Image (spheres, rainbow, N blue to C red):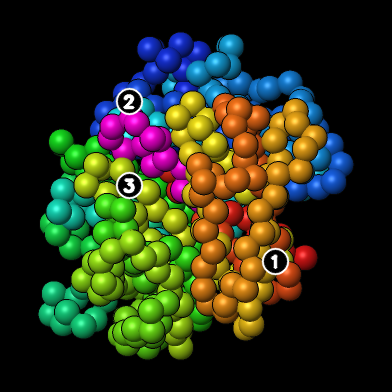
Amino acid sequence: MKKSLFIILALVLAAASFSQALAATPAPGGPFSTAFYIQNLTAVDETCSYSFYTSTGTVAYASATFSVAKNANYEIYTPSISGLTSGSYSGVISCDQKSEAIVNFSDADSAGSHNGISTPAATWYIPNLYNNYYSYYSNVYVQNTTGAPVNVTLEIYGPDPGNPNNSIKVYTSTKTNVPASASVVFDQVGVAQLLANKPYSGKIIATGNVAPIVNYYGGPGNVQLYTYNPFVNGTTKAYVPALYSNYYGYNTEMRVQNVGGATANVTITYSNGQTANVTIQQNSGKSFYTPNILPAGKTLYSAVVTSDQPIVVVVNESNAGNQAATYNGLAVGSTTVNIPAIMKNYYGYNTDVTCMNMGNVNTNVTITYKILGNAGVFQTTKTGIAAGRLVNFYTPTDTALVSPVTTNKKISAIVTSSGQPVNCIVNESHSTNPGDVLYSYNAFALIP
Protein backbone atom coordinates (compact mmCIF):
# COMPACT_ATOMS: atom_id res chain seq x y z
CA MET A 1 0.00 0.00 0.00
CA LYS A 2 1.40 3.40 -0.99
CA LYS A 3 1.63 6.07 1.70
CA SER A 4 1.73 9.71 0.57
CA LEU A 5 3.74 12.63 1.92
CA PHE A 6 2.72 16.12 0.87
CA ILE A 7 6.02 17.84 1.29
CA ILE A 8 6.85 20.59 -1.12
CA LEU A 9 3.80 22.76 -1.54
CA ALA A 10 4.59 25.78 -3.68
CA LEU A 11 8.10 26.09 -2.34
CA VAL A 12 9.99 24.10 -4.90
CA LEU A 13 11.39 26.88 -6.99
CA ALA A 14 13.34 24.22 -8.77
CA ALA A 15 15.63 24.40 -11.75
CA ALA A 16 16.99 21.99 -14.25
CA SER A 17 19.48 24.82 -14.65
CA PHE A 18 19.83 26.76 -11.41
CA SER A 19 20.67 30.01 -13.18
CA GLN A 20 17.26 29.96 -14.87
CA ALA A 21 15.22 29.47 -11.69
CA LEU A 22 12.50 31.95 -10.87
CA ALA A 23 13.11 34.87 -8.55
CA ALA A 24 9.77 34.75 -6.77
CA THR A 25 8.05 33.74 -3.57
CA PRO A 26 8.41 32.58 -0.78
CA ALA A 27 10.17 35.91 -0.24
CA PRO A 28 11.82 38.71 -2.17
CA GLY A 29 15.03 37.64 -3.82
CA GLY A 30 15.76 34.27 -5.29
CA PRO A 31 16.21 32.19 -7.24
CA PHE A 32 15.20 29.45 -4.78
CA SER A 33 15.95 25.75 -5.03
CA THR A 34 15.02 22.82 -2.84
CA ALA A 35 16.46 19.67 -1.33
CA PHE A 36 14.19 17.18 0.39
CA TYR A 37 15.07 14.22 2.57
CA ILE A 38 13.03 11.03 2.95
CA GLN A 39 13.61 8.82 5.99
CA ASN A 40 12.52 5.17 5.97
CA LEU A 41 11.13 4.50 9.46
CA THR A 42 10.97 0.73 9.08
CA ALA A 43 13.36 -2.21 9.31
CA VAL A 44 12.85 -3.22 5.66
CA ASP A 45 13.88 -1.50 2.42
CA GLU A 46 11.13 0.56 0.80
CA THR A 47 10.21 1.69 -2.71
CA CYS A 48 9.33 5.34 -3.28
CA SER A 49 8.56 7.81 -6.06
CA TYR A 50 7.65 11.49 -6.22
CA SER A 51 5.74 13.86 -8.49
CA PHE A 52 5.69 17.64 -8.94
CA TYR A 53 2.51 19.53 -9.85
CA THR A 54 1.86 22.92 -11.44
CA SER A 55 -0.65 25.48 -10.14
CA THR A 56 -3.27 23.92 -12.44
CA GLY A 57 -2.75 20.46 -10.96
CA THR A 58 -1.02 18.97 -13.98
CA VAL A 59 2.02 16.75 -13.51
CA ALA A 60 5.24 18.65 -14.24
CA TYR A 61 7.52 15.72 -13.43
CA ALA A 62 7.11 12.14 -12.21
CA SER A 63 10.13 10.24 -10.99
CA ALA A 64 10.96 6.62 -11.53
CA THR A 65 10.74 4.41 -8.46
CA PHE A 66 13.78 4.20 -6.22
CA SER A 67 14.78 2.29 -3.10
CA VAL A 68 15.38 3.73 0.36
CA ALA A 69 17.32 1.41 2.67
CA LYS A 70 15.85 0.38 6.03
CA ASN A 71 16.22 3.07 8.73
CA ALA A 72 18.14 5.24 6.23
CA ASN A 73 17.51 8.46 4.34
CA TYR A 74 17.42 9.54 0.70
CA GLU A 75 18.14 13.04 -0.61
CA ILE A 76 16.71 14.69 -3.74
CA TYR A 77 18.19 18.01 -4.87
CA THR A 78 15.80 19.58 -7.35
CA PRO A 79 18.30 21.49 -9.54
CA SER A 80 19.89 18.16 -10.43
CA ILE A 81 16.65 16.65 -11.75
CA SER A 82 16.97 16.35 -15.51
CA GLY A 83 13.70 17.23 -17.22
CA LEU A 84 12.32 19.48 -14.48
CA THR A 85 12.06 23.02 -15.81
CA SER A 86 12.36 26.15 -13.69
CA GLY A 87 9.18 26.96 -11.83
CA SER A 88 7.16 26.81 -8.63
CA TYR A 89 5.64 23.43 -7.81
CA SER A 90 3.79 21.43 -5.20
CA GLY A 91 4.81 17.82 -4.67
CA VAL A 92 3.87 14.40 -3.37
CA ILE A 93 6.14 11.55 -2.28
CA SER A 94 4.70 8.02 -2.26
CA CYS A 95 6.38 5.08 -0.49
CA ASP A 96 5.28 1.54 0.28
CA GLN A 97 6.54 1.73 3.89
CA LYS A 98 6.11 4.30 6.65
CA SER A 99 8.30 7.33 5.94
CA GLU A 100 8.70 10.97 6.87
CA ALA A 101 10.39 13.84 5.06
CA ILE A 102 11.72 17.35 5.54
CA VAL A 103 12.23 20.09 2.95
CA ASN A 104 15.09 22.62 2.82
CA PHE A 105 14.92 25.52 0.38
CA SER A 106 17.30 28.42 -0.17
CA ASP A 107 18.57 31.16 -2.40
CA ALA A 108 21.95 32.87 -2.25
CA ASP A 109 21.34 34.58 1.10
CA SER A 110 18.31 33.03 2.85
CA ALA A 111 17.02 29.60 3.77
CA GLY A 112 14.05 27.83 5.32
CA SER A 113 12.93 24.35 6.30
CA HIS A 114 9.61 22.62 6.96
CA ASN A 115 8.26 19.15 7.61
CA GLY A 116 6.46 16.96 5.11
CA ILE A 117 2.81 16.43 5.96
CA SER A 118 1.65 12.82 6.08
CA THR A 119 -1.73 13.56 7.71
CA PRO A 120 -3.52 16.42 5.91
CA ALA A 121 -6.59 18.07 7.46
CA ALA A 122 -9.31 20.59 6.59
CA THR A 123 -8.56 23.03 9.45
CA TRP A 124 -5.17 24.47 10.50
CA TYR A 125 -4.05 27.15 12.99
CA ILE A 126 -1.35 29.78 12.35
CA PRO A 127 0.27 31.65 15.28
CA ASN A 128 2.15 34.32 13.24
CA LEU A 129 1.01 36.47 10.32
CA TYR A 130 2.44 39.89 9.42
CA ASN A 131 2.04 42.88 7.12
CA ASN A 132 4.99 45.19 7.81
CA TYR A 133 5.51 43.97 11.37
CA TYR A 134 8.70 45.95 11.97
CA SER A 135 9.55 45.29 8.31
CA TYR A 136 8.46 41.62 8.35
CA TYR A 137 5.84 40.14 6.03
CA SER A 138 4.21 36.73 5.68
CA ASN A 139 2.54 34.40 3.22
CA VAL A 140 0.73 31.07 3.48
CA TYR A 141 0.94 28.21 0.97
CA VAL A 142 -1.87 25.63 0.95
CA GLN A 143 -1.82 22.42 -1.09
CA ASN A 144 -4.94 20.46 -2.00
CA THR A 145 -4.25 16.85 -0.99
CA THR A 146 -7.54 15.42 -2.25
CA GLY A 147 -8.46 14.08 -5.67
CA ALA A 148 -10.96 16.86 -6.50
CA PRO A 149 -11.00 20.70 -6.39
CA VAL A 150 -11.46 22.35 -2.98
CA ASN A 151 -12.12 25.84 -1.65
CA VAL A 152 -9.62 27.24 0.86
CA THR A 153 -10.33 30.13 3.25
CA LEU A 154 -7.82 32.03 5.37
CA GLU A 155 -9.20 33.90 8.40
CA ILE A 156 -6.92 36.38 10.18
CA TYR A 157 -7.44 37.53 13.77
CA GLY A 158 -6.03 40.55 15.58
CA PRO A 159 -6.66 43.08 18.35
CA ASP A 160 -10.06 44.72 18.62
CA PRO A 161 -9.46 48.48 18.09
CA GLY A 162 -12.25 49.21 20.60
CA ASN A 163 -10.87 46.84 23.24
CA PRO A 164 -7.21 45.73 23.00
CA ASN A 165 -7.95 42.87 25.40
CA ASN A 166 -10.23 41.24 22.84
CA SER A 167 -9.42 39.52 19.54
CA ILE A 168 -11.59 39.80 16.44
CA LYS A 169 -11.57 38.50 12.86
CA VAL A 170 -10.10 41.32 10.78
CA TYR A 171 -9.70 39.69 7.34
CA THR A 172 -11.00 36.76 5.29
CA SER A 173 -9.82 35.53 1.90
CA THR A 174 -11.05 32.51 -0.09
CA LYS A 175 -9.45 30.71 -3.02
CA THR A 176 -12.02 28.65 -4.93
CA ASN A 177 -11.64 25.47 -6.96
CA VAL A 178 -8.01 24.78 -6.08
CA PRO A 179 -7.09 21.80 -8.31
CA ALA A 180 -6.14 18.42 -6.88
CA SER A 181 -2.45 18.30 -5.80
CA ALA A 182 -1.97 22.00 -6.65
CA SER A 183 -1.28 24.80 -4.19
CA VAL A 184 -2.32 28.42 -3.75
CA VAL A 185 -0.70 31.29 -1.87
CA PHE A 186 -2.23 33.86 0.47
CA ASP A 187 0.06 36.87 0.69
CA GLN A 188 -0.34 39.34 3.55
CA VAL A 189 1.72 42.11 1.90
CA GLY A 190 -0.41 45.21 1.43
CA VAL A 191 -3.56 43.83 3.12
CA ALA A 192 -5.13 47.04 4.42
CA GLN A 193 -6.86 45.34 7.36
CA LEU A 194 -3.47 44.28 8.81
CA LEU A 195 -1.89 47.25 10.54
CA ALA A 196 1.84 47.93 10.58
CA ASN A 197 3.79 46.69 13.61
CA LYS A 198 0.89 44.49 14.79
CA PRO A 199 1.15 40.67 14.98
CA TYR A 200 -1.80 38.58 13.81
CA SER A 201 -2.92 34.95 14.02
CA GLY A 202 -4.77 32.88 11.45
CA LYS A 203 -6.95 29.89 10.70
CA ILE A 204 -7.20 27.85 7.48
CA ILE A 205 -10.58 26.28 6.69
CA ALA A 206 -10.94 24.13 3.55
CA THR A 207 -13.71 22.02 2.01
CA GLY A 208 -11.30 19.06 1.88
CA ASN A 209 -7.98 18.03 3.38
CA VAL A 210 -5.03 20.33 2.69
CA ALA A 211 -1.34 20.69 3.64
CA PRO A 212 -0.03 24.21 4.46
CA ILE A 213 3.16 26.02 5.40
CA VAL A 214 3.84 29.60 6.54
CA ASN A 215 6.74 31.89 5.60
CA TYR A 216 7.64 35.26 7.02
CA TYR A 217 10.57 37.31 5.92
CA GLY A 218 12.27 40.68 6.21
CA GLY A 219 11.68 43.57 3.87
CA PRO A 220 14.38 45.22 1.72
CA GLY A 221 17.82 44.89 3.26
CA ASN A 222 16.73 42.11 5.65
CA VAL A 223 17.39 38.61 4.34
CA GLN A 224 15.89 36.73 7.29
CA LEU A 225 13.45 33.98 6.26
CA TYR A 226 11.36 31.89 8.69
CA THR A 227 9.27 28.86 7.71
CA TYR A 228 7.09 26.47 9.69
CA ASN A 229 4.10 24.12 9.50
CA PRO A 230 0.76 25.31 10.95
CA PHE A 231 -1.07 23.14 13.50
CA VAL A 232 -4.05 20.82 13.14
CA ASN A 233 -4.82 20.62 16.87
CA GLY A 234 -3.96 22.47 20.03
CA THR A 235 -2.74 21.03 23.31
CA THR A 236 -3.10 22.06 26.94
CA LYS A 237 0.61 21.36 27.53
CA ALA A 238 3.34 22.30 25.05
CA TYR A 239 7.06 21.61 25.44
CA VAL A 240 9.67 24.06 24.15
CA PRO A 241 13.16 22.45 23.97
CA ALA A 242 15.36 25.43 23.05
CA LEU A 243 15.16 29.07 24.12
CA TYR A 244 18.10 31.46 23.74
CA SER A 245 19.04 34.69 25.49
CA ASN A 246 22.23 35.80 23.73
CA TYR A 247 23.22 32.12 23.57
CA TYR A 248 26.37 32.36 21.46
CA GLY A 249 24.70 35.34 19.80
CA TYR A 250 21.28 33.69 19.31
CA ASN A 251 17.96 34.90 20.70
CA THR A 252 14.43 33.50 20.54
CA GLU A 253 10.85 34.70 20.55
CA MET A 254 8.06 32.33 21.58
CA ARG A 255 4.56 32.88 20.19
CA VAL A 256 1.52 31.22 21.86
CA GLN A 257 -1.87 31.09 20.09
CA ASN A 258 -5.15 30.21 21.79
CA VAL A 259 -7.09 27.83 19.49
CA GLY A 260 -9.76 26.97 22.07
CA GLY A 261 -13.31 28.18 22.53
CA ALA A 262 -12.76 30.69 25.36
CA THR A 263 -10.11 32.95 26.88
CA ALA A 264 -7.05 30.90 27.85
CA ASN A 265 -5.23 31.16 31.16
CA VAL A 266 -1.64 30.28 30.29
CA THR A 267 1.35 29.50 32.52
CA ILE A 268 4.92 29.36 31.19
CA THR A 269 7.45 27.54 33.35
CA TYR A 270 11.07 28.05 32.31
CA SER A 271 13.87 25.61 33.05
CA ASN A 272 15.55 28.07 35.47
CA GLY A 273 12.41 28.12 37.63
CA GLN A 274 10.93 31.40 36.40
CA THR A 275 7.21 31.44 35.62
CA ALA A 276 4.82 33.75 33.78
CA ASN A 277 1.01 33.83 33.86
CA VAL A 278 -0.96 35.46 31.04
CA THR A 279 -4.42 35.42 29.45
CA ILE A 280 -4.86 35.04 25.69
CA GLN A 281 -8.11 35.70 23.85
CA GLN A 282 -9.71 33.07 21.60
CA ASN A 283 -7.91 32.78 18.20
CA SER A 284 -5.38 35.40 19.30
CA GLY A 285 -1.72 35.05 20.23
CA LYS A 286 0.95 36.60 22.46
CA SER A 287 4.72 36.85 22.00
CA PHE A 288 7.46 36.30 24.60
CA TYR A 289 10.92 37.61 23.71
CA THR A 290 13.46 35.54 25.63
CA PRO A 291 16.11 38.29 26.20
CA ASN A 292 13.44 40.33 28.01
CA ILE A 293 12.66 37.41 30.31
CA LEU A 294 15.69 35.16 30.95
CA PRO A 295 19.30 36.02 31.90
CA ALA A 296 21.71 36.35 28.99
CA GLY A 297 24.67 34.04 28.58
CA LYS A 298 25.77 30.57 27.58
CA THR A 299 22.74 28.82 29.06
CA LEU A 300 20.36 26.80 26.92
CA TYR A 301 16.84 27.11 28.33
CA SER A 302 13.68 25.08 27.86
CA ALA A 303 10.07 25.73 28.87
CA VAL A 304 6.71 24.05 29.47
CA VAL A 305 3.55 25.96 28.50
CA THR A 306 0.28 24.90 30.14
CA SER A 307 -3.21 26.24 29.52
CA ASP A 308 -6.86 25.62 30.37
CA GLN A 309 -7.65 25.98 26.64
CA PRO A 310 -5.92 24.30 23.67
CA ILE A 311 -2.89 26.30 22.50
CA VAL A 312 -0.18 26.05 19.84
CA VAL A 313 3.38 27.39 20.12
CA VAL A 314 6.09 28.42 17.65
CA VAL A 315 9.61 29.62 18.41
CA ASN A 316 11.61 32.03 16.22
CA GLU A 317 15.41 31.83 16.40
CA SER A 318 17.80 34.49 15.11
CA ASN A 319 21.18 36.12 15.57
CA ALA A 320 22.84 39.40 14.60
CA GLY A 321 24.26 37.74 11.49
CA ASN A 322 20.70 37.47 10.10
CA GLN A 323 20.50 33.69 10.55
CA ALA A 324 16.87 32.87 11.28
CA ALA A 325 14.53 29.87 11.58
CA THR A 326 11.33 28.67 13.26
CA TYR A 327 10.31 25.44 14.98
CA ASN A 328 7.03 24.22 16.50
CA GLY A 329 6.45 23.60 20.19
CA LEU A 330 6.02 19.91 21.00
CA ALA A 331 2.69 18.37 21.98
CA VAL A 332 3.52 14.64 21.92
CA GLY A 333 6.61 12.55 22.49
CA SER A 334 7.72 8.96 22.17
CA THR A 335 10.51 6.64 23.23
CA THR A 336 11.58 6.65 19.56
CA VAL A 337 12.11 9.82 17.52
CA ASN A 338 13.22 9.92 13.88
CA ILE A 339 15.44 12.58 12.28
CA PRO A 340 15.63 12.51 8.45
CA ALA A 341 18.71 14.71 7.95
CA ILE A 342 21.85 15.06 10.09
CA MET A 343 24.95 16.96 8.92
CA LYS A 344 28.55 16.70 10.10
CA ASN A 345 30.62 19.08 7.96
CA TYR A 346 28.25 18.31 5.08
CA TYR A 347 29.70 20.78 2.60
CA GLY A 348 30.12 23.17 5.51
CA TYR A 349 26.81 22.41 7.28
CA ASN A 350 26.50 21.01 10.82
CA THR A 351 23.54 19.95 12.93
CA ASP A 352 22.39 20.59 16.47
CA VAL A 353 19.73 18.24 17.89
CA THR A 354 17.92 19.37 21.05
CA CYS A 355 15.59 16.87 22.74
CA MET A 356 13.31 17.29 25.74
CA ASN A 357 12.19 14.80 28.35
CA MET A 358 8.38 15.06 28.23
CA GLY A 359 7.88 12.43 30.95
CA ASN A 360 7.64 12.53 34.72
CA VAL A 361 10.97 11.03 35.82
CA ASN A 362 14.60 10.99 34.70
CA THR A 363 15.47 9.20 31.48
CA ASN A 364 18.53 8.29 29.40
CA VAL A 365 18.60 9.52 25.80
CA THR A 366 20.55 7.83 22.97
CA ILE A 367 21.10 9.12 19.46
CA THR A 368 22.04 6.50 16.85
CA TYR A 369 23.37 7.84 13.55
CA LYS A 370 22.77 5.95 10.30
CA ILE A 371 25.48 6.80 7.74
CA LEU A 372 24.65 5.80 4.18
CA GLY A 373 27.13 3.23 2.93
CA ASN A 374 28.71 2.59 6.33
CA ALA A 375 27.72 -0.39 8.46
CA GLY A 376 29.39 0.88 11.64
CA VAL A 377 27.48 1.83 14.79
CA PHE A 378 27.71 5.53 15.62
CA GLN A 379 25.95 6.19 18.91
CA THR A 380 25.99 8.60 21.85
CA THR A 381 24.06 8.26 25.14
CA LYS A 382 23.43 10.95 27.74
CA THR A 383 22.05 9.85 31.09
CA GLY A 384 19.86 11.23 33.85
CA ILE A 385 17.88 13.79 31.85
CA ALA A 386 15.37 15.22 34.31
CA ALA A 387 11.66 15.57 33.57
CA GLY A 388 10.99 18.74 31.57
CA ARG A 389 14.68 19.25 30.83
CA LEU A 390 16.67 19.12 27.61
CA VAL A 391 19.61 17.24 26.15
CA ASN A 392 21.73 18.46 23.26
CA PHE A 393 23.71 16.63 20.55
CA TYR A 394 25.97 18.87 18.44
CA THR A 395 27.59 17.05 15.53
CA PRO A 396 30.96 18.92 15.45
CA THR A 397 31.63 17.88 19.07
CA ASP A 398 29.92 14.47 19.11
CA THR A 399 32.74 11.93 19.35
CA ALA A 400 30.51 9.24 17.81
CA LEU A 401 30.85 11.03 14.47
CA VAL A 402 34.46 10.60 13.48
CA SER A 403 35.83 12.49 10.46
CA PRO A 404 36.52 11.72 7.66
CA VAL A 405 34.00 8.84 7.92
CA THR A 406 31.15 11.34 8.34
CA THR A 407 32.33 14.29 6.24
CA ASN A 408 29.99 15.05 3.30
CA LYS A 409 28.03 11.87 4.03
CA LYS A 410 24.26 11.47 4.08
CA ILE A 411 23.25 10.81 7.68
CA SER A 412 19.94 10.21 9.42
CA ALA A 413 19.34 9.43 13.09
CA ILE A 414 17.06 7.72 15.57
CA VAL A 415 16.73 9.06 19.11
CA THR A 416 15.56 6.64 21.81
CA SER A 417 14.91 7.05 25.52
CA SER A 418 15.06 4.54 28.36
CA GLY A 419 11.34 4.79 29.05
CA GLN A 420 10.07 8.39 29.10
CA PRO A 421 8.56 10.17 26.08
CA VAL A 422 10.94 12.59 24.36
CA ASN A 423 10.86 14.72 21.24
CA CYS A 424 13.42 16.87 19.43
CA ILE A 425 14.01 19.88 17.22
CA VAL A 426 16.87 20.08 14.70
CA ASN A 427 18.93 23.09 13.63
CA GLU A 428 21.21 23.01 10.58
CA SER A 429 23.66 25.86 10.00
CA HIS A 430 26.67 26.69 7.85
CA SER A 431 29.98 27.37 9.54
CA THR A 432 31.22 30.13 7.22
CA ASN A 433 28.55 31.37 4.80
CA PRO A 434 27.18 34.84 5.56
CA GLY A 435 23.48 35.60 5.62
CA ASP A 436 20.54 33.45 6.66
CA VAL A 437 21.89 29.91 6.31
CA LEU A 438 19.97 28.44 9.25
CA TYR A 439 17.37 25.67 8.87
CA SER A 440 15.18 24.35 11.68
CA TYR A 441 12.64 21.51 11.66
CA ASN A 442 10.76 19.25 14.05
CA ALA A 443 11.81 15.64 14.43
CA PHE A 444 9.19 12.90 14.10
CA ALA A 445 8.07 11.11 17.24
CA LEU A 446 7.14 7.51 16.38
CA ILE A 447 3.67 7.23 17.95
CA PRO A 448 2.44 3.61 18.18
- Decide whether residue 228 is among the magenta residues: no
Residue at 19% across, 75% down: 160
Pinpoint residue 383: horizontal percent, then vertical percent: 64, 68
Pinpoint residue 283: horizontal percent, then vertical percent: 36, 73
Q: Nearer the viewer, residue 365 or 70?
A: 365
Amino acid beneath label 2: Ala
Pinpoint residue 37: horizontal percent, then vertical percent: 61, 36
Residue at 22% across, 47% down: 320
The residue that label 2 is drawn on is 108
Is the residue under label 1 in contact with that under label 3 (CB below 8 Å)?
Answer: no
Residue at 70% across, 66% down: 417
Amino acid beneath label 3: Ala
Q: Nearer the viewer, residue 272 or 42?
A: 272
Q: Earlier in the sequence, mark 2 or mark 3?
A: 2
Residue at 58% across, 17% down: 81
Mark nearest the camera among 3 and 1 is 1
Mark 2 to mark 1: distance in Å?
39 Å
Q: Earlier in the sequence, mark 2 or mark 1?
A: 2
Mark 2 to mark 3: distance in Å?
14 Å
Q: Residues within 10 Å of mark 1 (few under 14, many from 20)?
A: many
Q: Residues within 10 Å of mark 2 (few under 14, many from 20)?
A: some
The residue that label 3 is drawn on is 324
Pinpoint residue 275: horizontal percent, then vertical percent: 34, 85
Q: Is residue 409 above or below residue 147?
A: above
Q: Quadrant of residue 75?
A: top right
The residue that label 1 is drawn on is 417
Which labelled disc corresponds to residue 8?
none
